[in-house]
Image (cartoon, rainbow, N blue to C red):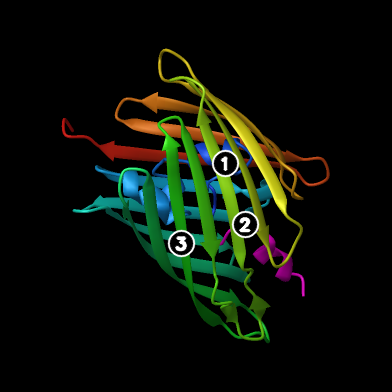
Amino acid sequence: MSYLPLFGQLPEAPVSGSGSAMGNTWISLRSNEASLLNPAALGYSRLYWVGVHHENRFLLKELGESSIGVTIPVTPGSFGISLSHFGYNAFSRIKAGVGYGMHLGKRFVAGVGLSFTRLQIIGEYRNDNAYLIEGGIHYLPTDKLVVGFYLFNPTHSKFDNLADIPVLMGVGLTYLISDRIQLVSQLDDDTQREPAFRFGMEYFTSKGIAFRIGYSTVSPEGITVGVGLPVKTFHVDFGLSHNQYLGFTPKLSISYLFTKKS
């Protein structure tokens, strides 16, 4: 069936923010956007945050995906809430999730998440629902290095006879060369395609503008570039990936961090 390859896209939510421009990495990043995918990153959040994201895969409106996420700090840790929609009126996937992350001592951060996903297909196919769990861990051997681990759908949940949902696991590394430069790499594998290696780099200017570049070996992703811009009290991230056969995929994220001043 033509819709099955859509579930090979990693994972069941868009990679927004900085990660989309650095090879679509997310496992070891310590950002609010990354917490929408790896709940371990929620353990770093101590302020309220809200962000929206949209991507138009290969410039096809039928493959558009939009999402919104909120981070709510508590004691200890933080909660994250997300909602995303993929597809169009003939085929769509809606996902709502909640996660929680917290510090486990000085060097470990861990998180878990639960999500509800609804698959809708017109015609002779019926709609179906699935409940998914995920979890992640960050280990910080030094202040400049993060080792991340992520596991998605270990219970092998699926949409009955409509489609399988992959089981995914991966590891990632983030290394801060300086206050302005960081390198990130990631290896992930699922039950529907070959292992993917991703890597990227981010450079911050003195004015807080971020330039990013990355690459993913998994098809149909490839080369990624992007820029992050602080706009008054908001932060805007733009990413672009290119596949030699399918074309460009633009991605845009806008987020707001509720600081004590605001």
User: What residue is shown at x 63% (from left), y 53% (from top)?
Assistant: 61
Q: Nearer the viewer, mark 3 or mark 2?
A: 3
Amino acid on which disc 2 is placed: Leu
Q: Position of residue 236 (x, y in %)?
A: 44, 33
Residue underneath mark 1: 20
Amino acid on which disc 3 is placed: Gly
Q: Quadrant of the N terminus?
A: bottom right
Residue 150 visible: yes
User: What residue is shown at x 64% (from left), y 56% (from top)?
Assistant: 63
Asked if the magenta segment contains residue 22, the reply would be no
Asked if the magenta segment contains residue 3, the reply would be yes
Task: Assign the magenta stretch its main secondary structure.
Answer: loop
Question: Is the residue 4 above or below the residue 99 in the image?
Answer: below
- Magenta-colored span: 1-13
Q: Is residue 260 left or right of residue 81?
A: left
Q: Position of residue 239 (x, y in %)?
A: 58, 36
Question: Is the residue 218 above or below the residue 140 in the image?
Answer: below
Q: Residue furthest right?
A: 245
